[in-house]
Image (cartoon, helix red, strand yellow):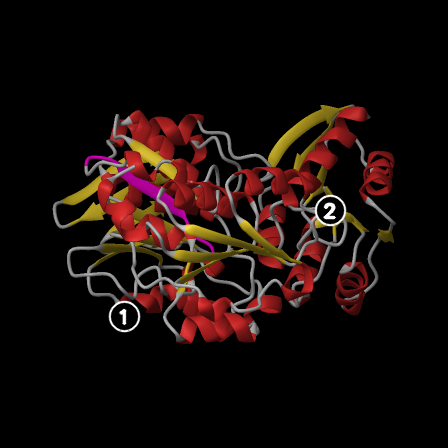
């Protein structure tokens, strides 16, 4: 481990709140650096049985269950998992004392390589992955992580100035950051995580941390078609690039007919064809435009950008093609945990759609999605905690063919019975997964298995 990291952390008393995957990696890192660790989680020892053995072997003090937040103010630093609400009184107190930090905060503090960060309400995983592939194909050494993949804290010691660090950053990871990446990108902003952030204003403010601490030599890429993200350009110190599906931009990239055009002070470059992109859906053309600008600023070549666009087929659980059975195509879009994402999925197909939707509630409204369902969906199958909420919005607009079922297995069986050759069965829940699943990946894997079982 680097000497400077050991010098900073050796002997420090650190409370780590939330014992998920990223914080387990963080604990290993801090233990090697010489810190004294107290592991905190509201889960019980029985619920954390797999993690407990390793933590005890590392000499970690464990405080679990209802009192997991006690005495936090006695520690030098408190590291918080992204999923822990920052509104909890004990967390607010350590923040007031200047002791709050996170795994991503350490990456920003200790990385010797420039960091490039991507956020947004939808499209950030696909865009981040595209950027990583474009840089790899351009032979630029790149590490991709943040809200996806393995925690980069495990590789922090290996970063050198010639590398590029590309991070997908959620609102939870951004909300308490005191640094912004050298390059930042905001794909779009729509209602999300209001159950945690409380208000749309709080949610937007957390997203803004991706650029608010930038310097004059940094850059930001924004969605010109989204009024909220477009207005963010007025707050930026560095250079701003825009991407658009709806019209020409002065600095950035846009769609004209099928041409994908990059424009800057030196003129225009046609770098691809929208109809030849491997990713389905108009929203993915926007993701590709954003990734092209971003990766180009980070060192990607136009040849690599074009090749990735024509060959990259997508990320698991994001409009993922699962199978074609008796002429019916099945798609897994389990990542769609908001109405906005499901609406984008519906607009990606011209064929009749049997939509499977519903899950746990994030306090979002479904009115606009209901309009999209009436326009694009042949039959709606609902499940989970939000089923009644979605049903009410859809029926408020008029009669519609729909069914409410108990679980995903029932939904897939019913969809298989309803679908005719040439139609689409789409899992795009417009809701989180936590009422029935550990996360959206587990939900998507269950759907994939059920379809393959047909």
Q: Residue 51: tell me if it is visible.
A: yes
Q: Upstream in the sequence, badge 1 or badge 2?
A: 2
Rendering quarter of residue 309? top left
The residue tagged 2 is: 46
- Quarter containing the N terminus: top left
Q: Is residue 356 above or below residue 314?
A: below
Q: Which residues are magenta?
A: 162-170
Residue appearing at x 69%, y 49% in the figure: 45
Q: Element under label 1? A: helix
Estimate how packed mark 1 is, as few (under 14), some (14 to 19) or many (20 or more) residues with alpha carbons within 10 Å: few
Q: Nearer the viewer, mark 1 or mark 2?
A: 2
Q: Element under label 2? A: loop
The residue tagged 1 is: 235
Residue appearing at x 60%, y 34% in the figure: 320
Q: Is residue 148 above or below residue 200?
A: above
**Residue 166 among magenta residues:** yes
Q: Is residue 336 left or right of residue 329?
A: left
**Residue 244 among magenta residues:** no
- Quarter containing the C terminus: top right
**Residue 90 coordinates in the image, percent (x, y):** 53, 72
Residue appearing at x 58%, y 66% in the figure: 69
């Amino acid at each position: 481990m680097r000497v400077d990291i050991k010098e900073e952390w050796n002997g420090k008393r650190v409370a780590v709140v939330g014992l998920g995957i990223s914080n387990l990696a963080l604990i290993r890192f801090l233990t090697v650096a010489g810190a004294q660790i107290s592991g905190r989680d509201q889960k019980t020892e029985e619920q954390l049985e797999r993690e407990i053995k390793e933590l005890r072997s590392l000499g970690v003090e464990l405080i679990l269950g209802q009192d997991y937040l006690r005495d936090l103010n006695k520690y030098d630093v408190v590291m918080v998992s992204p999923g822990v609400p920052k509104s909890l009184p004990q967390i607010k107190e350590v923040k007031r004392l200047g002791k709050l930090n996170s795994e991503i905060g350490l990456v920003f503090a200790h990385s010797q390589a420039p960091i490039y960060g991507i956020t947004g309400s939808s499209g950030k995983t696909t865009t981040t992955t595209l950027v990583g592939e474009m840089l790899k194909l351009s032979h630029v050494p790149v590490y991709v992580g943040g809200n996806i993949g393995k925690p980069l804290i495990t590789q922090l010691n290996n970063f050198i100035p010639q590398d590029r660090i590309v991070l997908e950053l959620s609102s939870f990871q951004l909300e308490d950051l005191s640094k912004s990446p050298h390059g930042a990108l905001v794909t779009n902003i729509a209602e999300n995580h209001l159950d945690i952030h409380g208000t749309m204003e709080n949610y937007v403010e957390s997203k803004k941390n991706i650029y608010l601490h930038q310097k004059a030599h940094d850059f930001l890429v924004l969605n010109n078609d989204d009024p909220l993200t477009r207005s963010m350009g007025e707050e930026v110190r560095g250079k701003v690039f825009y991407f658009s599906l709806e019209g020409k931009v002065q600095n950035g990239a846009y769609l004209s007919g099928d041409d994908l055009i990059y424009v800057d002070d030196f003129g225009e470059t046609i770098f691809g064809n929208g109809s030849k992109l491997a990713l389905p859906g108009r929203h993915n053309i926007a993701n590709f435009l954003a990734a092209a600008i971003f990766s180009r600023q980070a060192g990607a070549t136009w040849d690599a950008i074009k090749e990735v666009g024509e060959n990259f087929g997508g990320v698991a659980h994001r409009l993922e093609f699962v199978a074609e059975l008796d002429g019916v195509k099945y798609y897994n879009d389990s990542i769609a945990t908001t109405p906005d994402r499901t609406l984008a999925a519906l607009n990606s197909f011209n064929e009749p759609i049997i939509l499977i939707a519903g899950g746990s509630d994030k306090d979002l409204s479904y009115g606009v999605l209901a309009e999209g369902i009436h326009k694009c969906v042949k039959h709606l199958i609902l499940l989970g905690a939000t089923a009644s909420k979605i049903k009410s919005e859809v029926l408020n607009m008029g009669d519609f063919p729909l069914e409410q079922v108990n679980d995903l297995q029932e939904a897939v069986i019913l969809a298989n019975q309803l679908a005719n050759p040439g139609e689409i069965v789409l899992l795009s829940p417009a809701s989180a997964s936590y009422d029935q699943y550990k996360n959206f990946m587990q939900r998507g894997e269950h759907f994939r298995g059920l379809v393959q079982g047909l």
